[in-house]
């Protein structure tokens, strides 16, 4: 008890709301997240199904939100718990940030629906339980007989054993992102592993997290909400002056060249 009372106050508080689909459970969790008065409130979607993610991105951009961008993060091995652990570990690495993770959970009346959804929530909570300065809260929303859903999209079964080498498509001679120095003009090559979707009510900008095997850097394109050919999984090179942007290492309005782009998402075929 004494150690807890004497623990130093951390400078920033980041709240992450995990978003599966755009529905009332998500809206409830975002509303609760605002009451925590965080320094940074993030809605985060892990991309398991590109078609579903594409629908979510377009629906999110059409909302009237001005303070809720959506971070879409690639999940190549389809393990959400590991992706959540990597995200939280990155945010708490400097030991100055307290992170609260909110998991919206729909309360179903049918037992098999509850079991499937609880398994996902509990796996994420278990993966994060030993991370210092991290709190996990499951935010329930009780669905009635007629659920109110803004955008209903069915999830598809994913294979947890499937694994994709995220660096397989990168050139072997690319400049290492870990070696990028501030205030120096650099050229980096990597794979887009995360993107931030800005709602139409916010300031237009496109933010992409470019990663190679050594690190990650943010590319910020002001005045643009989308760039043809740039999506999760795109491999590109970017040139510009590196610096800090909202506490992140970034290149603002870089010159870029797209090296490869994954196929556009398609609607699943019924069997």
Image (cartoon, grey):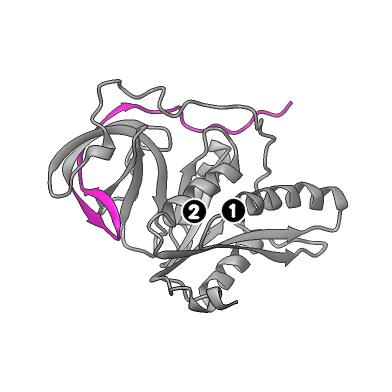
Spatial CA distance of label 2 from label 1 is 8 Å
**Residue picked out by circle 1:** 128
Residue 254 is inside the magenta segment: yes
Residue 88 in the image: state x and y as whole percent.
Answer: 49, 53
Residue 131 in the image: state x and y as whole percent.
Answer: 54, 55
SS class, disc 1: helix
Locate the C terminus by quadrant: top right
Check if mark 2's residue and mark 1's residue have beta carbons within 8 Å. yes
Locate the N terminus by quadrant: bottom right
Start and end of the magenta stretch?
242-271
Towards the viewer: 251 or 86: 86
For the point 48% across and 49% down, which residue is it? 87
Towards the viewer: 28 or 173: 173
SS class, disc 2: helix
Towards the viewer: 177 or 270: 177
For the point 68% across and 52% down, which residue is it? 121
In the displayed structure image, the side of residue 140 where residue 223 appears, left or right? left
For the point 37% across and 57% down, which residue is it? 94
Residue 166 is inside the magenta segment: no
């Amino acid at each position: 008890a004494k150690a807890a009372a004497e623990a130093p106050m951390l400078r920033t508080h980041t709240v992450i709301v995990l978003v599966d689909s755009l529905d009332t459970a998500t809206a409830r969790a975002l509303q609760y997240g605002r009451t925590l008065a965080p320094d940074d409130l993030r809605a985060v979607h892990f991309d398991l199904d590109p078609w579903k993610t594409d629908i979510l991105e377009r629906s999110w951009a059409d909302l009237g939100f001005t303070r809720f961008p959506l971070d879409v993060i690639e999940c190549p091995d389809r393990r959400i718990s590991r992706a959540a652990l990597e995200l939280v570990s990155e945010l708490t690495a400097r030991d100055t940030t307290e992170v609260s993770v909110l998991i919206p959970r729909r309360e179903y009346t049918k037992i098999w629906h509850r079991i499937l959804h609880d398994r996902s929530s509990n796996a994420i909570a278990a993966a994060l339980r030993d991370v210092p300065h991290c709190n996990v809260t499951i935010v329930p929303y009780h669905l009635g007989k007629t659920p109110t859903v803004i955008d209903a999209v069915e999830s598809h079964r994913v294979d947890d054993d499937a694994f994709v080498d995220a660096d397989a498509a990168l050139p072997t001679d690319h400049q290492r992102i870990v070696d990028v120095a501030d205030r120096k003009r650099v050229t980096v090559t990597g794979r887009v592993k995360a993107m931030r979707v800005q709602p139409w009510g916010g300031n237009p900008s496109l933010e992409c997290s470019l990663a190679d095997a050594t690190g990650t850097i943010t590319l910020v394109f002001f005045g643009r909400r989308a760039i043809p050919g740039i999506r999760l999984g795109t491999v590109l090179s970017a040139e510009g002056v590196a610096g800090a942007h909202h506490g992140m290492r970034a290149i603002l309005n870089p010159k870029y060249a797209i090296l490869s782009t994954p196929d556009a998402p398609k609607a699943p075929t019924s069997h």
